[in-house]
Image (tube, rainbow, N blue to C red):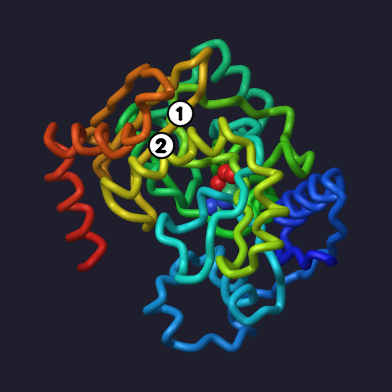
Amino acid sequence: MKIRIGTRDSKLALWQAEMVQALLKDKGFDSELVLIKSEGDMDLQTPLYAMGVQGVFTRSLDVALLNNKIDIAVHSMKDVPTQLPAGIVQAAIIERGVVNDLMVFKSADHKQAYDNGTADLNTWNIATSSIRRKAQLLHYYPECSIHNIRGNVLTRLQKLEQENWDAVIFAQAGLERINARPEASVVLDWMLPAPAQGAVMVVCLDRDKDVLAACRLLNHEPTDTCTKVERDFLKTLMGGCSTPISAYAKIEDDKIVFKGSLCSLDGEENIEVDTTIDIADAEDLGILLAQEVLVSGGREIVDSIRNTNNS
Ligand SMILES: NCc1[nH]cc(CCC(=O)O)c1CC(=O)O
């Protein structure tokens, strides 16, 4: 059996797919990479929507899987909608690396000012297209100017050079994996990451039992446990769309340390929850904490975000 690994063709996606290929090889499985072009050139049938395919970054791979063009698909887990398409299952979560967001500065002077505390981010122009990052920036620096930015990691780095911005925000994992982290950058430990940021998910068809069994061997239990709590939190609050929701769970000794937040779009309100609990008691942790957020003012924030998105 030669396992066909479906991947997008960005540098980051290829790095992640090659990592999965190496892990499969360790377990004695041969595989090959199949590069899947943008969803535009796929024969997309409308009923797929009804089956729950919705992720903008993951849809073309899901379609390839359902059409038997590939045996597994490798995704950045934070891009995967909390509801998988019918027939597709989570087969493995790979051990997570770094999880934080990273600020890349326009210049070494910017970094120096940030590091020694003299930078006033309220006067800065910062680019990000993530509404989670935008909301948190505005929460801590209400006067900061935020600009939209599009494209893959390398394109976004180029734009920082061209535009009159002070900084751009990335996932640390995305830049470090492709060896593209600039010197003038800093890890934002005050910004809470997206649910499952930095984690890689392997999916396959539910009925493909041999492939599923092979992939299960790659599953990293602690990362699986933590990302499940984070995604339960996300799902209970809002579902899988792009939202100002953050969550990070880690394991220390036999406990899960969790922190999550829901921010209003303008950053004015930020409801945070955190807890430390025995792993054995953590089955419903993400759901319970999301419910706690909802009754502490989160319901109103969620409703106003829904109204904004629909108008
Ligand atoms: N939304 C795009 C995306 N999906 C995964 C990553 C990076 C790797 C990760 O966060 O797991 C990125 C780029 C970014 O957020 O800067």
Residue in view at x 41 percent, y 38 percent? 230
- State which quarter of the image contains the C terminus: bottom left
Residue drawn at x 69%, y 41% is: 175
**Location of residue 93 by image quarter:** top right
The one of 36 and 111 positioned closer to us in this rendering: 36
Visible residue check, residue 47: yes
Q: Position of residue 207 (x, y in %)?
A: 58, 69
Q: Secondary structure at mark 1?
A: strand
For the point 32% across and 32% down, the residue is 285
- Please report contact status of discs 2 and 1: CB closer than 8 Å, yes or no: yes
Q: Is residue 234 above or below residue 202?
A: above
**Among the two numbered marks 2 and 1 on one chain, the one whose residue lies closer to the N terminus:** 2
Q: Judge from the rendering whether residue 188 lies leftward or rightward of residue 281; answer left or right.
A: right
Q: Mark 1 sits on what residue?
A: 249
Q: Nearer the viewer, residue 117 or 170?
A: 170
Q: Is mark 2 within 8 Å of ligand 1?
A: no
- Quarter of the image for residue 90 reads bottom right
Q: Is residue 59 above or below residue 26?
A: below
For the question of whether residue 8 can be seen, the reply is no
What's under tag 1, amino acid-wise? Ala
* Residue 116 coordinates in the image, percent (x, y): 56, 11
Percent position of residue 267, x then y? 28, 37
| Residue 282 found in image quarter | top left
Q: Secondary structure at mark 2?
A: helix
Is 64 drawn above or below residue 220 in the view shown?
A: below
Judge left or right: residue 229 versus residue 59: left
Q: Residues within 10 Å of mark 2 (few under 14, many from 20)?
A: many
Look at the image and tell me in which quarter the N terminus lies. Answer: bottom right
In this rendering, position of residue 202 left or right of residue 283? right
* Residue at the spot of label 2: 229
Q: Amino acid at mark 2?
A: Val
